[in-house]
Image (tube, coloured by chain):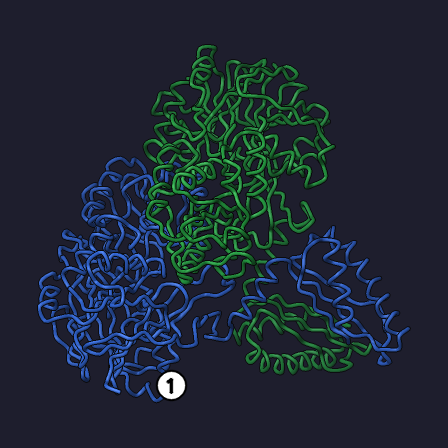
Chain colours: A blue, B green
């Protein structure tokens, strides 16, 4: 078998290759990104999901990992690092802003001394083991983003990270088209490219157009302005700060994660905000309404973030007042719409006017749309196309785009996480998917719950539980009345009658057992209760019977 | 106090006045619509929500109800009737198609003999008590829809129902503009109008444009076509049937609710489909792929509907095959996006191509957009505007539209469900909101669970339960080892260690109690367990301790 370059996207069933991609050539491994996923609505009680990288824990691969390369500083690309560094001690490479955010994250987790952090700038060349890594600048919604050109013994791989072809980004640093053209001239074996917006026609608007949209809002708003966005959407903070300066408002930042991100970005020179623009919330609430803008977290309707608390009137320092204008500067992540719209309704109920992307130009995507994806493919002219970053439907649409541009179907690999793709200079082979999937983070536990526990929680969520502790006399007979309790099943009034009936039922079941000369069994009581409760209510609570 | 007309939208916290509106003038009451709401993602285990009409159950109002008027045959307007007729025996008035659908619903619930059903046609005049009711035709996504002009002693009220100003609807019956103009000439006291699309600029596309979109898909599809939509979206079935005829495909309908709706619509002449077009699924699966189209339920990603089962490969008669084209002809209802996209990904995984509204013209809204809302207001020229049908954010935007057209803010009432609006010929007064809210339907119970039970289910969903049955000797001491069990908390491996430790903890707590000369109490054990489990896992399961 000739040597091959293996590309392996890992993660769960959601977005593919978004949170982590493994590149393996013989005895050397690179990791690109280490992000978290957020649980779907039916992954009950789960806090976070980290990529399932057990592939790296097998066959002595840990010792082969040469570097963890990070494309940019968003949570879905760096959030799993505190978990990763417990297993993987390879140095983490990132641009200065990204590294600043990683540093803060590892410091908070008391893991800053676990690994080496290596800073690079777009345009540099890094020789890491047998890999020549060339980070190139791309535009997205946080500054200092890169993709990677990685020259391997099998050929040159281009990984875009998250990107859009913004010619007028807010930091004045457009994507490095020249580098992409240079890669193309050298010949690109495989292109791994962002598919997030593969169902979005045309070109994604520039951040600069958003600046215009923000100015329109600032010009028209008589009262206070509250801008909600992601903590790490530094470019959005820059746009709001510029509008605040222009319209003579001070800016206060609520939400620790955003305050930290802004602090790091300012310190490293990625956010141009004059010192006197930023004030404390305590000061801000005493300014005239027309003189202040608040930046807050909670743009996805998260109940515990600042905006969620404002919407419910539960923030300590700040409260919504008549005449406030709230800007949702974010697009709903699928699954969050309900919480977002509920938050918007609550804000309206408190007297605010709410602007969101359906009714005002207050958000642009950070990802390339279909025409940009075409431009990328035609710029790079890869032999093989591997769509990544997106759900399966996005990857399929991205693959269709590739085909319309002349890449034959057999040179495009649409795979799901956990599926190895083996490349030689002449071939691409998709292997069978490896077992594995999600790793749930819940409370302090990583991987201490799985689908079985989530399914149990789902059953409990459907109809609660019904407990019976049945005291026996040691000879198989009932020693007293059973102790029954129920929760989440029916309301107290209904429960009263059901508990009385259930008590009689248990006594009858026990008497029947005694007549047959067998001891009372929890399973006999369980199945009697199951039948009875379903007949009475058409619900199926979790039933637990303990014979004591 | 002079006599007033009271308008009272009832329902939950979601869409306002969508599912039921009460009109009360002295001793006479009319009800408009009686629909169901679907639970939000965090209303765990709830099957349906019906409007909270306890207002009607008080003060002898039941005897004053003269009629239940229905605008059209969608679930969110007729779905609560089987519950309603248990309390309210007033006749139900509807157009022939709507009445056919209601009849089927009541027959299934064995309640057909409970109430009188009265058929009317748009354009007729009904004198009901002191009310002159004039149903007028509107366009929507099901045929035979009406709004109501209701002449009351206080003045003329216009209630639009769900509407759009489609000039080329698929049934060739555009809305009755002349009637609206006539109302306007007579003078309209209050306009209650659909706000659903108040955040959608421009005009809603005509159903006829959709016909074009469907033909494009049918022309291009080499394999089978599967169209998913709502069971009662009769207009969509008509469009698909026309395309099937044109491109020489037979049509099979999967899903009982859709088959029933189609049967009723055909019988009553609201769906023009030649007899030989419709075939059984059994026949359809044996036809060449290019000769068949399947109509299926499940366009909102419902796991138990036909499309959900197809996506998971769990339908008895039908399965997805390579080359199938699946059309999602519906817009995601907020909260359903995640399930819908998951279904789309599963369909792709099985080899289908999936078309949905972001990437193909396969759906148009059934509701008026902002320009239509303006036209309506300018046609009607009401003294008072009462936006209904929509979440609070939609109503607020609708109110803004009214203001830009010159209706002063004080003549627009944006209220939430349960808020009475009292009208005289000269005034509109918004009263305090009445107590009440949701009525949950869960299993066979109506109102047998409430927020307390949903909150319990939520706690169980977060971290499961931990159950301890502690046997005592009657003198306050431990009579044996406690019996512990847990579910949905941590996985079995983790649980093993925790259960052992918890057993020791309970023994220590019991010993401590005995040393202090007090009997073992479940609350002491509970709080010890609570602390222990949280320290170990950072999770808070529901803990239940029973001392036996």
Residue B109, horizontal then vertical, whole percent: 69, 41
Residue sitting nearer the eye, A139 or B82: B82
Residue B236 position, x and y percent, is 45, 38
Query: Which of the pair B494/B259 is nearer the observer?
Result: B259
Q: Is residue B35 left or right of residue B179?
A: right
Judge from the rendering whether residue B178 lies leftward or rightward of residue B464; answer left or right. Answer: left
For disc 1, the chain is A
The residue furthest top is B186
Q: Tell which of B24 and B297 is nearer to you.
A: B297
Q: Residue at x 24, y 53 (%)?
A: A370
Whether residue B373 is visible to the viewer of this picture, yes or no, is no
Instruction: Give the number of marks.
Output: 1
Q: Secondary structure at mark 1?
A: loop
Q: Is residue B417 visible?
A: yes
Residue at 23 percent across and 42 percent down: it is: A213
Report which residue position mark 1 lands on.
A58
């Amino acid at each position: 078998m000739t040597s091959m370059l293996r590309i392996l996207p890992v993660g769960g069933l959601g977005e593919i290759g978004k949170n982590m991609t493994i590149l393996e050539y013989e005895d050397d491994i690179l990791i690109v990104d280490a992000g978290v996923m957020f649980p779907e609505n039916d992954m009950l009680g789960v806090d976070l999901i980290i990529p399932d990288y057990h592939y790296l824990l097998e066959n002595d691969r840990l010792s082969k990992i040469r570097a963890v390369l990070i494309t940019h500083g968003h949570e879905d690309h760096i959030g799993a690092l505190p978990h990763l560094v417990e297993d993987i001690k390879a140095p983490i490479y990132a641009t200065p802003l990204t590294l600043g955010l990683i540093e803060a994250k590892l410091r908070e987790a008391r893991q800053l001394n676990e690994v080496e952090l290596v800073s690079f700038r777009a345009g540099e060349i890094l020789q890491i083991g047998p890999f020549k890594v060339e980070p190139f600048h791309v535009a997205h919604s946080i500054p200092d983003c890169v993709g990677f050109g990685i020259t391997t013994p099998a050929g040159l791989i281009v990984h875009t990270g998250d990107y859009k072809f913004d010619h007028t980004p807010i930091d004045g640093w457009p994507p490095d088209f020249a580098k992409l053209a240079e890669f193309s001239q050298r010949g690109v074996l495989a292109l791994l490219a962002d598919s997030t917006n593969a169902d979005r026609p045309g070109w994604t608007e520039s951040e600069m157009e958003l600046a215009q949209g923000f100015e329109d809002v600032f010009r028209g708003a008589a009262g206070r302005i509250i801008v909600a966005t992601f903590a790490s959407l530094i470019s959005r903070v820059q746009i709001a700060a510029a509008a605040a300066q222009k319209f003579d408002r001070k800016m206060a930042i609520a939400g620790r994660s955003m305050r930290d991100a802004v602090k790091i970005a300012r310190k490293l020179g990625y956010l141009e905000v004059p010192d006197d623009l930023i004030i404390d919330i305590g000061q801000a609430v005493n300014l005239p309404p027309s003189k202040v803008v608040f930046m807050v977290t909670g743009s996805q309707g998260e109940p515990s973030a600042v905006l969620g608390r404002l919407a419910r009137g539960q923030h300590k320092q700040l409260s919504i007042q008549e005449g406030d204008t709230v800007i949702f500067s974010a697009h709903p992540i699928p699954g969050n719409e309900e919480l977002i719209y509920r938050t918007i309704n609550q804000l309206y109920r408190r007297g605010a006017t709410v602007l969101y992307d359906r009714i005002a130009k207050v958000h642009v995507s950070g990802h390339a749309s279909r025409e940009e994806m075409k431009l990328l493919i035609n710029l790079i002219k890869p032999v093989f196309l591997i769509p990544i970053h997106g759900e399966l439907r996005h990857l399929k649409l991205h693959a269709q785009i590739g085909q319309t541009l002349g890449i034959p179907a057999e040179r495009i690999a649409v795979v799901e996480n956990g599926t190895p793709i083996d490349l030689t200079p002449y071939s691409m082979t998709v292997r069978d998917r490896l077992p594995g999937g999600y790793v749930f983070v819940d409370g302090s536990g990583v991987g201490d719950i799985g689908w079985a526990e989530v399914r149990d929680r789902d059953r409990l969520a459907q109809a609660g539980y019904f407990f019976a502790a049945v005291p026996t006399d040691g000879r198989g007979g009932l020693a007293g009345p059973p102790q029954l309790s129920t929760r989440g099943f029916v309301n107290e009034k209904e429960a009263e009658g059901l508990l009385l009936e259930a008590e009689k039922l248990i006594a009858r079941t026990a008497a029947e057992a005694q007549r047959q000369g067998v001891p009372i069994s929890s399973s006999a009581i369980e199945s009697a209760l199951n039948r009875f409760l379903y007949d009475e209510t058409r619900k199926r609570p979790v039933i637990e019977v303990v014979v004591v």
